Amino acid sequence: MAQVSLQNIRKIYPNGYEAVTSTSFDIADGEFVVLVGPSGCGKSTLLRMVAGLEDITEGSLSIGDRVVNDVDPADRDIAMVFQNYALYPHMTVRKNIGYGLKNRKTPAQEIERKVDEAAKMLNLEPYLDRKPSQLSGGQRQRVAMGRAVVRDPALFLFDEPLSNLDAKLRNQMRIEIKALQRRLGVTSIYVTHDQVEAMTMADRIIVLNEGRIEQIGTPAEIYHSPASTFVASFMGAPPMNLLEARLEGGQVFVNGGTPLANAQGRGAVTLGIRPEDVAFDPAGPLDFHIDIVEELGAHRLLHGQLAAQNFTMHVSKEVAAAPGAVRVGLKADALRLFDAETGKAL
Amino acid sequence: MKRAGFTTRWLPILLLLPQLIIIAIFFYWPAAHAVQSSFYLQDPFGFGSTFVGVDNYKDLAGSGEYMKIARFTLVFTTLVTFFSLALALLLAVKADKVLRGARSYRTLLMWVYAVAPPVAGFIGLIMFDQSWGPLTELARSMGWDFKLGVNFNDTAVAMVIVSVWKQVPVNFIFFLSGLQSIPKAVREAALIDNRSATGRFWQVTFPLLAPTGFFLLIINITYALFDTFGIVDTLVKGEPGNNPMTLVYKVYVDGFRGNDLGGSSAQSVVLMVLVLALTIFQFRLVERRIHYT
């Protein structure tokens, strides 16, 4: 267990491509931090630099009290879970889990005890003498987890560990990983492109875009107060509605009509509202034309046009809805304003 | 699932026929012919042959010269196989790590592949030439009076070197592609699990290369036994007398120089049985220990 600190970390590939621009953040002891972003945003590169699988072009990385820029991956006291599990295909589950311990000169009895303990924790006991090729995807994932926990490292690194699993198994493993991390209290960095994983697992989320940090915050902060239109549209399913709006005389207008909120400044802005912060309101200020009703059981999503822009609204299962025109109101304290050009929150 | 099948009986037979004919004419017929003539004593001038039963085989078993050649072939095959595999593996592991100019580097290592065995033998003749061969001079500078074609051991060394040199590129190509087919993440996981590069190689990389290695082992033994004919022929050309030769070359020498077709047929039957036994041994014993992903 340790705290991790990244100071002005940069990654520039030999071809001149800057995968990660100067990035700094600290991770507290025992914290579960999720790096999330679209593919090519630099999240995996960042993780691989922490692991030591990728050189750090600039900046300093410390794990615990130690600067580890030039320390071998094996000496960084980390364990990593890979996307495609990266199990050793020629070793049994027992040997896969124990391999890291064996190379650290752990006595054989100790290895046996720790492997058994990890196997018990992960329900792998019946499979210890099988080869990875005889296991299902979920079991392989557990072996990969076992290989990480058995070493009792200072830091867990997860590189999209669930993206090869089917949806049901993914939900289950998500909870298992989270519970395991809680129980062991090991500092963890988890990379994913799936915003649901990020929201559900993280103590803190770091949203990355094009090699830069867009926002760092708790899941609630990220969801309710996105720092930019990028975060607003990336986090949440369906994403936050973004409408072109105007700021005039201290008030916000969408498509003329009734003022929606008060704010300083003037000119073009982007107005953001989460789909669940919109409600049917016969006296409401806006016309919403529903095109499609998406039935999801617990709730419904209504997709359509508002002020000639795509718009989605979330209603509970008790609220009947059908295609056609309705009047809606927006929850005033849930409105977010962004600069129309830079996309930054105002 | 519905199985695709033929509606008529003669169509699949017709389609298989060309392949079956080729196998029959070029493999089974000559093999059967060799087995048959190994029981006869042929007249050197082709006027007839006499059935002699297993006399040809008895002669072989009693021949000290044949046993000596068999021993040499065993040593030769072992050395050629070992060194061409080991060198190729070393080069492949090193080439796999090269980042800049990897392509041209690999091409340079591969192009000996295009050299035909007799040409390789001829290059060997030049390199080991008695009066001006650069390798002869190198040996001399180290106090070794190298005499190709005169000294048995020197000729054997040259044969091994040229045969290995000729075979390394083939093995290199296979090892390199084998290395590159090992998932990157598995090697990275090993990087985190084991700080020793040697340990990682022997415990993770090497076992995962085993299928490639096993395939190459068979290919290389076959190469050393049979395909080195051209190299042996070029290096000992004219005076096989005191020079080392392999069993295959002996088949040729006895059959076509000595005109003893029966004896040479018996030798090729022995070789056939040897290869058969070797193949069975390899598949039964070695392959079982190998992990195919």
Image (tube, coloured by chain):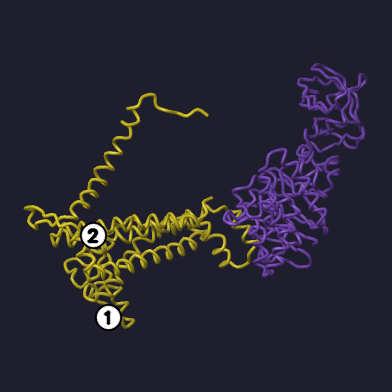
Foreground residue among B118 and A214? B118
Viewer can see residue B226 = yes
Which amino acid does the dot numbered 2 rest on? Gln
Q: Mark 2 lies on which chain?
A: B
Tell me, by letter, which chain the rendering colours purple. Answer: A
- Mark 2 or mark 1, which is nearer the start of the sequence? 1
Q: What element carries label 2?
A: helix
Viewer can see residue A303 = no
Q: What element carries label 1?
A: loop
Q: Mark 1 points at which residue?
A: B145
Q: Mark 1 lies on which chain?
A: B
Tell me, for residue B267, which label it has, or none.
2
Q: Colour of chain B?
A: yellow
| x and y, in percent, of residue B287 in the image | 46, 55
Q: In which quarter of the image is residue A241?
A: top right
Question: Eyeballing the image, is A101 above or below A139?
Answer: below
| x and y, in percent, of residue A210 in the image | 69, 46
Say left or right for B58 vs A342: left
Q: In which quarter of the image is residue A48?
A: bottom right
> Residue drawn at (80%, 43%), measured in percent from left and top?
A199
Outermost front residue? B53
Question: Eyeballing the image, is A72 above or below A84?
Answer: below
| x and y, in percent, of residue B240 in the image | 19, 68
Say left or right for B199 vs A121: left
Which amino acid does the dot numbered 1 rest on? Asp
Q: Quadrant of residue B241?
A: bottom left
Outermost bottom residue? B143
Mark in front: 1 vs 2: 2
The image quadrant where one finds the C terminus of chain A is top right
